[in-house]
Image: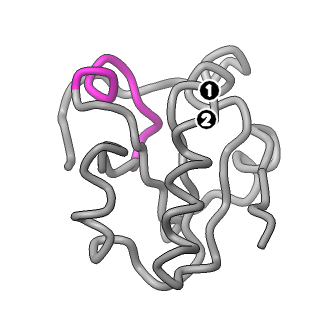
Amino acid sequence: MPIEEVSIAAFTQIRNDTTVLIDVREPDEYESGHVSGAVNIPLGDFANRIDEVPNRVVYFICRSGGRSMQACELCVDFGLTDVKNIAGGTIGWINAGNQVVVGGSKG
């Protein structure tokens, strides 16, 4: 099953207060700057924390898009199929002029 990739521009348009966003970077990366509202579940812990991923539309982000795609693939392996990868990751988010939150590990 192909994983849908969503551009930064598209994500900013569809994002709202109920959007589930999971950042799969390591805690120190997450704390150095993350998209507001993102929950941190590092890719290395992902298989053990898969039960924290809701069975609904979930967006995944990392630094540039590679690790978040791996997380999407793991979700599909576990039967969670409504997952979307944010192309360009946090780097793309920042380069598009969007703000990040520093500190506050939420995972």
Q: Nearer the viewer, residue 52 or 77?
A: 77
CA distance for labels 1 and 2: 6 Å
- The picture quadrant where one finds residue 81 is bottom right
Q: Say which mark, if any, is on residue 66.
A: 2
Q: Quadrant of residue 84?
A: bottom right
| Residue range of the region highlighted in magenta in the rendering | 28-37
Which residue does the image show at 68% across and 23% down from the upper left?
92
**Which residue is at a point 38% across and 72% down the rendered structure image?**
53
| Rendered view: 43 above or below 16 | above
- Where residue 7 appears, as percent x and y from the top left, is 80, 42
Q: Secondary structure at mark 2?
A: helix
Looking at the rendered structure, the kind of residue marked 1 is: Ser
Question: Residue sitting at 77 percent across and 73 percent down?
Answer: 1
* Residue appearing at x 70%, y 46% in the figure: 12
Q: Residues within 10 Å of mark 2 (few under 14, many from 20)?
A: some
Pick whichever, 69 or 22, lies toward us.
69
x, y percent for residue 103:
21, 25
The magenta stretch spans residue 42:
no
